[in-house]
Image (tube, rainbow, N blue to C red):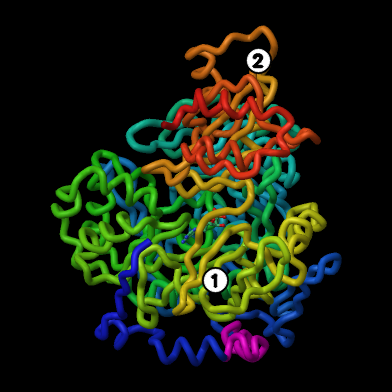
Amino acid sequence: MSDAVYPVPADFAAKAHINAEKYQEMYAASVNDPEAFWGEHGKRIDWIEPFTKVKDTNFKLGEVSIKWFEDGVLNVAANCIDRHLPTRGNQTAIIWEPDDPNDPALHITYNELSEKVNRFANVLLSQGVMRGDRVVIYLPMIPEAAYAMLACARIGAIHSIVFAGFSPDALANRINDSEAKLLITADTAPRGGRRTALKSNADQALLHCSDKVRCLVVKHTGDQTTWVDGRDVDVKALMETASPDCPPRPMNAEDPLFILYTSGSTGKPKGVVHSSGGYLVYAAMTHQYTFDYHEGDVYWCTADVGWVTGHSYIVYGPLANGGTTVMFEGVPTYPDAGRFWAVCEKHNVNQFYTAPTAIRALMGQGNEFVEKYDLSDLKLLGTVGEPINPEAWNWYNDVVGKGSRPIVDTWWQTETGGHMLTPLPGATALKPGSATKPFFGVQPVLLEPQTGEEIHDTAAEGVLAIKDSWPGQMRSVWGDHERFEKTYFADYHGYYFSGDGCRRDADGDYWITGRVDDVINVSGHRMGTAEVESALVAHAKVAEAAVVGYPHDIKGQGIYCYVTLMNGEEPSEELRKELRTWVRTEIGPIAAPDLIQWAPGLPKTRSGKIMRRILRKIAEDDFGALGDTSTLADPSVVDDLIENRMNR
Ligand code: 6R9
């Protein structure tokens, strides 16, 4: 924790959309009269039929229902493209920076984006994709990913992006859960000089899906792939002959725009459903105000479109605002640890948004990688995905920002659609490690974890919940509204429960302390420990497994696995490697265990529940504070685990 406070630079405040006074005034208006506030701000996007109702939301368990602008009619793609054409058709919409810095970058204008998206949309129609159909997108960071998203939005299809780092199994599960009609993938995906065989992953996944699922393939690298006639379709070839004109389909505000699967505390990822109208209003408004985005700025978010950050802050928010957004195919350390800064210099980036894990990794490589480049166009820096430790914040501030660029630490979730707690750079004093204050319309509360009572003292700690709805909120879990209610509205009645713990200081600034459920955050990626456990126990030699997070210098949290082997199986280094590879192929490389401890037994209560609290403490090498172990069935198990712990 750090006590430093960085006031808003006066010159920044003078030019910013929102200064301190305006924040106070608008925030008060947003919570005192949400109808009036959002009725006004809902007009920031174009409506084919204007809405007459603003808000109809209910957090009561059993009746949870969230609707914004419900009788409004719009098209999201038209908002991100068509409405900009008369004034900025020749302005760059997307700057695409390839993995290999020697390959040319692309500058895609709004006119060009329009043509590509229209053609892509016509290809989707020609494949029989209709309004409301699900389309799974399994693409790397190439312009076609944005074209595919916007093409779906144009015809009213619901996209579901699966991160290109996920395994064939994970992909198949998501195709099946959403009952998708179509999969869009690419031949191979270059990243950091290596190539991932995406199409071959897709082939494997499709073995487990209905044979009606078609596969559109973007020939990106031209690498050889298998080809199934009648199922596989060359998108680029079809786009060439498709009409460049596809009228945007009028959609209701509450029609789903996309599904995005995310990890929770139980085994199966949830399909988070986002709306068209409320989501777009919220993504656009947060993008403009949090990053203080101005006409003509070049903005870069380094996330992948496979995560929610890529949805809201590479594609929908920036394009709805008529901005210029950078899309980067590569990784921060290829060809060397200066790549981010080389790209910032090359494209004159004004706002730069990344994850703490990337900052920590680059910080260890030395300042010369940053200092080589001219970063004078940078006006603002941002972070997202996990708490940022003060060392990383200070390095980001001093070395990258030269001590003069505000850093916005944005707390939000797949479920929230957009920023919830964040400084507004012209309005909010910064504190390293704090996401500071709520965005307009967001009413955070701290609840007593046991009783669920709202804590009214300013300085306090509790679980973070949100009172009342905001337009970007998720609407449901795909195909399972009951699970939506149970996950977010059952533990604490009348609130949206975030799953995060949080502290509020005497100034009313919020500090996220991390998840309070069985979700871990590895390099800013959310993972349910239960998912890793079910992958492990699916291995023939594993009898039982328990997975927890532990502090990791670069990743924030690492994956610590306690594994009990089947009778007769012998632990070995080889088996450790085998299990690691196993989990990688079951879920994907991001889920690969960091540490595997052989556990002859796991600490359990007499009723057979694994006591994760204890396992967490051992993994944190903090076993002096194990707390109450009196309910353990066999306390001697714990001594053995401590004795053989991996993280000392
Ligand atoms: C956008 C995104 C959400 C979880 C969230 C929290 C953690 C995100 C954070 C942060 C501290 C921040 N988180 N931003 N923790 N400070 N600025 O990351 O969505 O992948 O759904 O993860 O990430 O624990 O609950 P998602």
Which residue has dot 2 on it? Answer: 541
Q: Which amino acid does the dot numbered 2 rest on?
A: Lys
Q: Residue furthest top?
A: 568
Residue 631 image position (x, y, % from top left): 73, 38
**Label 1 residue SS:** strand
181 on left or right of 562: right
Q: Tell me which residue sits at (22%, 71%) in the image.
A: 404
**Which of 2/225 is in front?**
2
Residue 331 visible in rendering: yes
Which residue has dot 1 on it? Answer: 460
Residue 298 visible in rendering: no
Q: Which image quarter holds the C terminus?
A: top left
366 on left or right of 260: left
Vertical placement of residue 412 versus 199, above or below: below
Q: Which residues are magenta?
A: 29-42
Residue 50 image position (x, y, % from top left): 68, 85
Q: Distance from label 2 to label 1 (Cα)?
A: 47 Å
**Dot 2, how many residues are within 10 Å of its Cα: few (below 14), some (14-19), or many (20+)?**
some
**Label 2 residue SS:** loop
Q: Which amino acid does the dot numbered 1 rest on?
A: Ala
> Is 41 within the magenta?
yes
Q: Tell me which residue sits at (53%, 35%) in the image.
A: 618
